[in-house]
Amino acid sequence: MLEIFNQLIYEYQKGMRDMVLYTCSSKFRNEIETLLKKHGLLYKIYALSDEKINVFFGAEPCIKILENFSSENLSKLTKEEDFILGIMLGYSREEQYNRYISNINCHKMDNIALLR
C-alpha cells in the first residue's frame, strides 16, 4: 500500500505533479504523516469516514487553495472548486473543461426548468 504512496512522493518531487490526492485506510495515517514530514512536504488530511482518509500534498499555493475550499467533502465542492482541484491534481485539462461545461449546462437547464 505505501509503495504507491512513496511513488507519488517521488513523482511530486520530480515535478511531475503540483498536488497529489491519495485515498487510503485511516490505519496508515501515522505512517503517511511521518513520511510527509520526513520529506518536508505540505499536506492536508481529511477523514472520509472512520476507516478512510484523503491525503493531499503538494505545492504551497495548491494547499492554500485547498484550505480555502467551501468543504472538505469533495462531493460538496462548487463546480468551480471541482474544476480547480482537477487542474491542480493534473487531470486532463480537456476533460476538466468538458466536465465543467457539462456541470454548468446541467445547472442552466435546472434553472430553465425552474422558471417554467
Image: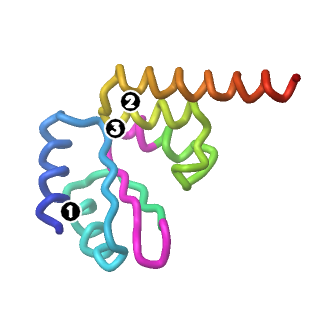
Left or right of 46? Residue 113 is: right
Q: Residues within 10 Å of mark 3 (few under 14, many from 20)?
A: some
The answer to whether residue 66 is magenta is no
Left or right of 21? Residue 112 is: right
Q: Earlier in the sequence, mark 2 or mark 1?
A: 1
- Asked which quadrant contains residue 29, the reply is bottom left
Question: Where's the N terminus, which quadrant?
Answer: bottom left
The answer to whether residue 52 is magenta is yes
Left or right of 95? Residue 16 is: left
Q: Residue type at mark 3?
A: Leu
Q: Which residue is mark 2?
A: 87
Give the structural element (helix, strand or loop) at label 2.
Answer: helix
Q: Residue type at mark 1?
A: Lys
Relative vertical location of residue 15 with respect to residue 13 in this rendering, above or below = above
> Could you tell me residue 71's position as x and y percent?
60, 50
Q: Which residue is mark 1?
A: 38
Residue occupying the point 48% across, 41% down:
64
Q: Which residue is mark 3?
A: 89
Residue occupying the point 79% across, 26% down:
113
Q: Is there CB contact under 8 Å for labels 3 and 2?
A: yes
